[in-house]
């Protein structure tokens, strides 16, 4: 699994790390029991602060996606992929609702919005 930081993203760096690790777990690129890079190793590889990677791992631990084993590191937990998928859908629904509000403010019609989405999906 490769984590790529987008400096132009509106997401904080730790959120980008969390999102990409979640996606890797969801897509089975990371499997239950698999070791993650140490906090320091990941920070070094991504050229970010150790505090940033620590925060990302803490967020993932809170969601029971990874677990810390004292003296050994972090490991992927057994996850309920359906639960994780549903959680992703809820977040996406919120984002889409925000975008639809922006479209409405811009005076776009339903048909214009749907046409835009169709064009983007085809790309």
Image: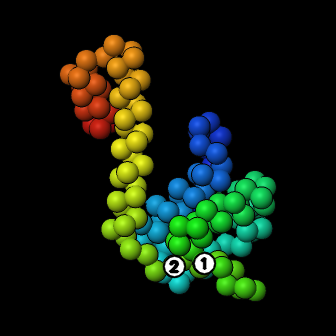
Q: Secondary structure at mark 2?
A: loop
Q: Nearer the viewer, residue 59 or 32?
A: 59
Residue 49 spot, x, y in % from top left: 78, 55
Per the image, the residue denoted by label 2 is 77
Is 31 placed above or below 45 here? Answer: below
**In the rendered structure, are the residues bearing label 1 and label 2 in contact, judged by CB atoms less than 8 Å apart?**
yes
Q: Secondary structure at mark 1?
A: strand
Disc 1 residue crowd, few under 14, some 14–19, many 20+, Cα 10 Å: many
What is the count of numbered marks?
2
Is 37 placed above or below 3 here? Answer: below
Q: Residue at x 36, y 44 (%)?
A: 93
Q: Residue at x 71, y 73 (%)?
A: 38
State whether residue 47 appears in this view: no
Q: Which mark is residue 83?
A: none
Is 121 placed above or below 63 here? Answer: above
- N-terminal label among 1 and 2: 1
- The quadrant in which the N terminus is found is bottom right
Q: Is residue 38 shown left or right of residue 83?
A: right
Q: Residue at x 67, y 84 (%)?
A: 69
Residue 41 spot, x, y in % from top left: 74, 68
Q: Is residue 111 shown left or right of residue 55?
A: left
Per the image, the residue denoted by label 1 is 67
How far apart, in angstroms, are the residues tagged by discs 1 and 2?
6 Å
- The quadrant in which the C terminus is found is top left
Quadrant of residue 104 within the rendered picture: top left
State the residue lying farthest toward the left. Answer: 111
Q: Nearer the viewer, residue 84 or 2?
A: 84
Disc 2 residue crowd, few under 14, some 14–19, many 20+, Cα 10 Å: some
Residue 70 spot, x, y in % from top left: 72, 85
Quadrant of residue 68 within the rendered picture: bottom right
């Amino acid at each position: 699994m490769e984590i790529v930081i987008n400096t132009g993203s509106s997401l904080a760096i730790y959120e980008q790390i969390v999102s990409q690790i979640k996606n890797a777990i969801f897509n089975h690129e990371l499997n239950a029991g698999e070791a993650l890079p140490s906090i320091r190793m990941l920070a070094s590889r991504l050229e970010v602060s150790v505090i940033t990677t620590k925060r990302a791992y803490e967020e993932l631990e809170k969601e029971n996606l990874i677990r810390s084993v004292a003296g050994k590191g972090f490991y992927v937990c057994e996850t309920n992929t359906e639960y994780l998928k549903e959680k992703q859908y809820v977040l996406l629904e919120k984002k889409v609702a925000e975008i639809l509000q922006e479209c409405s403010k811009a005076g776009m019609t339903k048909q214009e919005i749907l046409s835009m989405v169709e064009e983007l999906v085809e790309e």
